[in-house]
Amino acid sequence: MFGLGLPEVVIIAIVAIVIFGPKKIPELGNALGKTLRGFKEELNSDDDDETTAEQEKQ
């Protein structure tokens, strides 16, 4: 995962818990998931738009 080993991931997780607190972490994960899901949907919809435009030309 991005060239990070287990010790680095553990340190990053500990720092995140200290900075944001254990109650805020799930909220941040949820927001990140929604953002990534929306980004992925937009990428897929752009592909669909291009496919539709190519079909209309023919």
Image: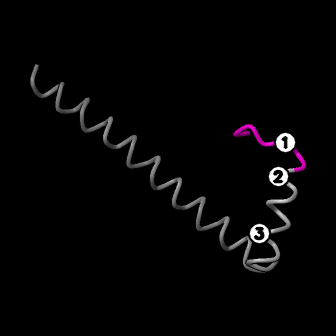
Amino acid under label 3? Ala
Q: Quadrant of residue 56?
A: top left
- Looking at this view, name the residue that lies furthest to the left: 57
In screen coordinates, is 29 left or right of 52? right
State yes or no: discs 2 and 1 in contact (Cβ < 8 Å): yes
User: Which residue is label 1 attached to?
Assistant: 5
Q: Position of residue 33 (x, y in %)?
A: 60, 59
Q: Helix, strand, or loop for circle 2?
A: helix
Residue 13 higher or lower than 23, as above or below: above
Residue 58 higher or lower than 29, as above or below: above
User: Which residue is label 2 attached to?
Assistant: 9
In screen coordinates, is 14 left or right of 24? right
Q: Position of residue 42 (x, y in %)?
A: 38, 49
Q: Quadrant of residue 26?
A: bottom right
Residue 36 higher or lower than 20, as above or below: above
Q: Where does the C terminus fall, quadrant-wise?
A: top left
User: Which residue is label 3 attached to?
Assistant: 16
